[in-house]
Image: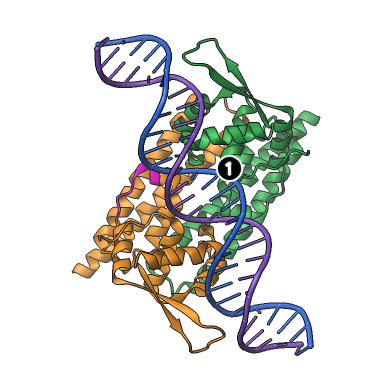
Chain colours: A green, B orange, C purple, D blue
Amino acid sequence: MKPPLIESPLSLAILGLLSIGPMSGYDLRKVFLTTAMKTFSASPGAIYPALRRLAKDALIEGAVDQRNALRPRRVFTLSRRGKAALGQTLTQPVAREDVVQRMGVLLLRFSFMSGLVEGRQITGFLQAFATETEAYAGEMEATLRENASRLPFSGRASLELGIESFRMNARWARKIREELAKRQSLKRS
Amino acid sequence: MKPPLIESPLSLAILGLLSIGPMSGYDLRKVFLTTAMKTFSASPGAIYPALRRLAKDALIEGAVDQRNALRPRRVFTLSRRGKAALGQTLTQPVAREDVVQRMGVLLLRFSFMSGLVEGRQITGFLQAFATETEAYAGEMEATLRENASRLPFSGRASLELGIESFRMNARWARKIREELAKRQSLKRS
DNA sequence: TGCAGCATGTAACCTGTTACATGATTAG
DNA sequence: CTAATCATGTAACAGGTTACATGCTGCA
């Protein structure tokens, strides 16, 4: 069986964290609670079932840890298969719908790229990200112009913020891409 | 029975659109498909069940329209109870978790405020929005500083974008709030 | 002794996704 | 005539939320 793509944002976040090092469910939960990753949910009712699903798919392995035993902790490690699945998922192409509906997941994917995928892939991702994001900002701007008169003041203001946000994301991607490209050409020389 | 708060983003979007004028399920779907509201889902498998739920709660009323009958279209109207529920929902306080987990819903709420709620409420909303958003940006910045060394390059870059995004949203809210405040003082004079 | 916190989990519920079904109408 | 589009819907499934359960340990 080939490693599957990770669909759920939470599962992706968990695999990403485990790619850095082994953790228990509770450790993961603390990370979610105390960082911006809480956007992907920090509730035990989401995390433990997700861990169970990932283990069933053999993407992670749980081992009982007795040191420091309050109660036996289950520490999870990314399996080879899990690492493959994560790599596959991170390097999927950037589609327009991703930008529109799953910007958070795109950023999450980028967050874990360092070290896991090649420089080429990262700059390629940022390129596509910038292109699609800028294009969508353009689309939004077009619909804003068409409907500006019909829209209530607050609707228009929200749309304008949306457009500016996507533009900012695109600028960010281009900037980071350039930084990375410079580093890479230094390394090759 | 008091009008309930609207929990689901999609239902809120539907009520908001119906507050502008009556529409059929298909009309709603077209709006979702062709505008930035597609973030709240445009699939019939979400919209029609949502309409059914709203009708069951007596927040909207459906009437069969025979003019132009391809097939009988069901046109939905916001009921008085629905309008009350919408008003209640739009004027809920802005909590920190809203900013962290449901920024999209906050912007959606703001989008429909014009005309439905008083100017006081709108400027109050923007004030709270700006405060909470700025505060959360500060939190993120603090965790970034604490963990900067441990974070991989891409993780750090994502976090920085996140912080800048929230800052931008806060600036936007303050700007719009001022514009509205000016208008309101003009109107009173 | 009792209470707060550690660490794990489950069950009911809600909502959204995907994919399919249906029948009518209009354009080529 | 037939294909596309209009307009409505349903069923199976997936994943997250809320709320609760459990037992252990350290502390006041």
Write the residue at 37% across / 53% down: B173
Q: Quadrant of residue A166?
A: bottom right
Q: Nearer the viewer, residue A73 or B30?
A: A73
Residue position marked by numbered label 1 in the rendering: A9
Asked whether, in this view, residue A182 is left or right of residue B59, the answer is right
Write the residue at 75% across / 31% down: A186
Q: Nearer the viewer, residue B106 or A177?
A: B106
Residue B55 drawn above or below residue B137: below
User: What is the quadrant of the N terminus of chain B in the image?
Assistant: bottom left
Q: Quadrant of residue B56?
A: bottom left
The subunit carrying tag 1 is: A
Q: Position of residue B94 (x, y in %)?
A: 33, 48
User: What is the quadrant of the C terminus of chain B in the image?
Assistant: bottom left
Q: Position of residue B96 (x, y in %)?
A: 36, 42
Q: Is residue B96 magenta?
A: yes
Magenta residues, start to end: B92-98
Q: Secondary structure at mark 1?
A: helix
Write the residue at 35% across / 48% down: B130
Q: Is residue B185 magenta?
A: no
- At label 1, the amino acid type is Pro
Instruction: Confirm whether residue B149 shows in the render.
Output: no
Q: Position of residue A150 (x, y in %)?
A: 44, 75
